[in-house]
Amino acid sequence: MLAFRLCVVLLILPWIGVAQSLQDQISSLFDSVYQHNQEALGILIHVESPGHNISWTKAAGFSDKEKETPLMPEQPVLLASNTKTYVSAAILRLVENQQFALDNAIKDLLNKNTSTLLTQDGYDLNRITIRHLLSHTSGIHDYVNEEYFNWVMEHPQHQWTRDEQINRTIEIGEPLFDPGTSFSYGDINYLLLTEIIENTSKQPFYKAIRTLLKYDELGLHTTWFDQLEYPPLHTMPFAHQYANDFVCDSYEMNSSWDLYGGGGIASTVKDAALFYQYLFTGKIIQNNTILKEMHTYVLPPEESKYCLGIFHFDFGYNLYYHGGWWGTDVNYSPETNTSVAVFTLVKEKRNEINPLLGKRIQALVLSKTNLNKP
């Protein structure tokens, strides 16, 4: 343990001043990272660390390339695949409410038409379970592939439907593997989960998720499904999100290409960090046994570190994490009781910035947490 603490301190020493408060150290780290990565255009960050009295948001750079409008901390973005954590939490709330069990087969939980299509395509829906969908171990072909991206970029304003994307899954191919035997990440798993949410709750999945995840009760007032819900009152305009390799701007894309559970949620950086904080401290899922399932490996960790809507990494401390295609990353560490959300507006800069900030801030908070222990 002493060696680990020393490594943590050595990791963060270049970034901190001895006399600085923890929040000032985090801010200095953020400023330094942005100064060395201004091609990212803009970066948003929120750190929520109740044990250190930190609830801190900051923005650097610009919200768009054309006008170079200063980026504001309260501007929302599209979370893309971070949405999967929200869908998973909603499913686990239904498990908590005894609507079904994680290992229930999905055959009778899906829409009849969807069930028929998948069965005709060779999928045994009596063997595929809720857990398999949540952990991407179902063996179902995903509709998202290179051809899909190419078509989306050529037809950026196409209004996709969930059924259209399910049909594309059927057209692509047969089952990838027997359920539960391997991992293959796919948005199709979470589209099917939104059908299950609707059929169980008897309301549109986005309304059910809002209720199940207690947005109003917890004050998550700037979190919503784009297109499917009205933006909350007084919400600032979206920040632009760019994918340079695809020459695209989120403002020019119809968000329905990534809307029905695999992605779709819009949020501010603060709301995203607070959601993780509330989720992993039992304010949303109160049954600890069910909550633990969320970050328990389904396959051996050397085969997949994906659990139920969340990645679980071991860096000498536990880190629960998910990221999104547009450059959004959120993590939570139970050792520090700290969540960190980092949104980078240029997708291609995400891998240089988000893990660097997320992991170093957690290491910094951990070093302070350990030093304060008796």
Image (cartoon, grey):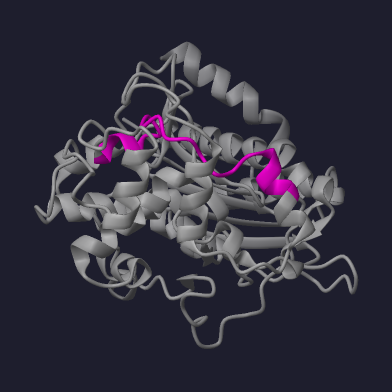
Q: Residue at x 47, y 54 (%)?
A: 83
Q: Quadrant of the N terminus?
A: top left
All told, the count of numbered labels is 0
Q: Write the residue at 61% across / 72% down.
A: 74
Q: Quadrant of the C terminus?
A: top left
**Where is residue 196 drawn, in percent x and y?**
27, 55
User: Between 306 and 165, which is closer to the camera in this rendering?
Assistant: 165
**Residue lying furthest front:** 120
Front residue of 324 and 190:
190
Which residue extends farthest right? 66
Q: Is residue 66 above or below residue 166?
A: below
Whether residue 41 is visible? yes
> Can you tell which quarter of the image residue 283 is in?
bottom left
| Picture residue at 44% right of the left edge, 56% below the top | 261
In the displayed structure image, the side of residue 357 where residue 34 appears, left or right? right
Residue 263 x %, y %:
51, 55
Residue 321, x across and y down, in percent: 47, 39
Residue interval drawn in magenta: 130-150
Q: Position of residue 18 (x, y in %)?
A: 64, 38
| Residue positioned most to the bottom | 233
User: Against 87, is 311 above or below?
Assistant: above
Query: Is residue 287 rendered magenta in the image?
Result: no
Q: In the displayed structure, does residue 19 sit left or right of residue 364?
A: right
Q: Residue furthest left?
A: 98
Question: Could you tell me which residue is drawn at 40 percent across and 34 percent down?
Answer: 136
Q: Which one is in front, 124 or 356?
A: 124
Can residue 88 be seen here? The reply is: no
In this view, 32 is above or below 372: below
